[in-house]
């Protein structure tokens, strides 16, 4: 690649619209661009997403590189990496920011190989060091903050959710939208189907409140009270790896190193002992409430508020009290 000329955020879309984290990346990218005195690019990629280009400009992008193709309607690692890499080489992007989501992590890894770029994952702070980037990331369940400095000409970051505020909109902000002609060519991957989340589910990655369940629930049916509690406080539903592996709940709810890293203001862990990989994915939450029969388990030790007891007995009582205080007579699982 020739000498880099700009910072780019990759605006991944979901069902044709930019993901919530795109607007957090715009905040991070805007601050870096102003300090480096470089333009901020947004790579808007998908099947048919042109209608969102001005919205990205209104939220801080100077130039939107529009990558539209029917083959990009649904995310596949191979095609998205090919498209973004070709664009990055054409535009000489030397700093790319992606969301630390399942898709973002996978895409960043592939881009790192294609562009021979350095990669810092799950960063929580970014700064400019001369012409390059420096980043901080938490490790070992948040007990250590490491600092990463790049030596490679091309630098890629995946950014944790909710560490940067959503960019404010400035309607009518000036900027450019430039289409990029992408030829997908043959692919070894075929997209089969998409399973949407239930209509009343709160997105786990963007949630300010999360209620998670673990083996302490006893069985898959135990997640009914988790969903009831989550619904009563407007929270997303999370889960430990153990219950996902047991088939009690879908993988999209998994919190931890092998699932989603989350940073809500409130995290309620119900029947979760706190394996290291789970703690690493949620330990930076604001207030952590743990309910468990084992007062000495890691989750109870980590929690801001620890409640010793059986989740199947306590949660219905909590739900009943919440409904009482709300003045609601909504039907649900009766308290014991």
Image (spheres, rainbow, N blue to C red):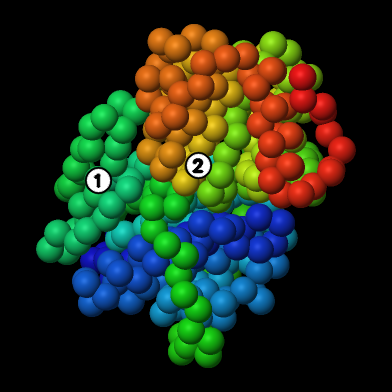
Q: In this view, does 159 lie to the left or right of 334?
A: left
Q: Label 1 crowding class (10 Å Cα cut-off): few <14, some 14-19, many 20+?
A: some
Residue 317 point in image, percent of width and height: 70, 27
Residue 262 in the image: x percent, y percent? 48, 40
| Horizontal relation, residue 226 to residue 166: left or right | right
Residue 84 in the image, given as x and y percentages of width and height: 48, 57
Q: How far apart are marks 1 and 2 (CA)?
A: 23 Å
Residue 189 visible somewhere in the drawing: no
Q: Which of marks 1 and 2 is in front?
A: 2
Depth check, front residue: 216 or 19: 216
Residue matched to label 2: 266
In front of the other: 135 or 189: 135
Above or below 172: residue 142: above
From the viewer's perspective, is residue 165 above or below residue 80?
below
For the C terminus, give its image quadrant.
top right
Direction from residue 143 to residue 159 in the image, left or right = right
Residue under pointer 1: 136
Q: Where is residue 248 in the image (x, y as percent from the top left)?
A: 72, 20
Q: Is residue 311 above or below residue 189?
A: above
Which residue is pictured at 33% across the width and 46% down the height? 123
| Horizontal side of residue 112 vs 251, given as left or right | left
Measured along the vertical axis of the image, is residue 296 above or below residue 253? above
Q: Which residue is drawn at 44% across and 21% down?
A: 299
């Amino acid at each position: 690649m020739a000498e880099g000329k700009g910072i780019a955020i990759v605006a991944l879309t979901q069902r044709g619209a930019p993901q919530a984290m795109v607007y957090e990346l715009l905040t991070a990218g805007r601050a870096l661009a102003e300090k480096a005195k470089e333009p901020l690019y947004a790579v808007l990629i998908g099947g048919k997403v042109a209608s969102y280009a001005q919205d990205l400009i209104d939220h801080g992008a100077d130039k939107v590189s529009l990558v539209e193709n029917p083959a990009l309607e649904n995310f596949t690692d191979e095609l998205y990496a090919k498209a973004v890499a070709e664009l990055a080489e054409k535009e000489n992007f030397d700093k790319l920011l992606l969301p630390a989501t399942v898709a973002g992590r996978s895409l960043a890894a592939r881009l790192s190989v294609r562009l021979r770029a350095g990669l810092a994952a799950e960063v929580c702070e970014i700064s400019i060091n001369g012409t390059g980037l420096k980043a901080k990331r938490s490790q070992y369940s948040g007990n250590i903050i490491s600092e990463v400095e790049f030596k490679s000409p091309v630098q890629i970051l995946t950014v944790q959710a909710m560490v940067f505020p959503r960019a404010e909109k400035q309607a009518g902000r000036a900027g450019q939208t430039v289409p990029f002609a992408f030829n997908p060519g043959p692919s070894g991957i075929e997209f089969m189907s998409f399973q949407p989340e239930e209509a009343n589910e709160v997105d786990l990655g963007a949630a300010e409140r999360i209620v998670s369940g673990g083996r302490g629930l006893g069985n898959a049916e135990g997640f009914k009270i988790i969903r009831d509690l989550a619904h009563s406080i407007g929270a997303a539903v999370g889960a430990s790896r153990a219950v996902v592996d047991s088939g009690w709940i879908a993988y999209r709810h998994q919190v931890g190193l092998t699932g989603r890293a989350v940073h809500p203001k409130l995290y309620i862990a119900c029947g979760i002992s706190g394996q290291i990989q789970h703690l690493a994915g949620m330990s930076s939450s604001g207030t952590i409430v743990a309910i468990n029969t084992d007062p000495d388990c890691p989750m109870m030790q980590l929690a801001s508020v620890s409640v010793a007891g059986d989740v199947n007995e306590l949660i219905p009582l909590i739900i009943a009290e919440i409904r009482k205080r709300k003045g609601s007579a909504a039907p649900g699982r009766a308290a014991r």
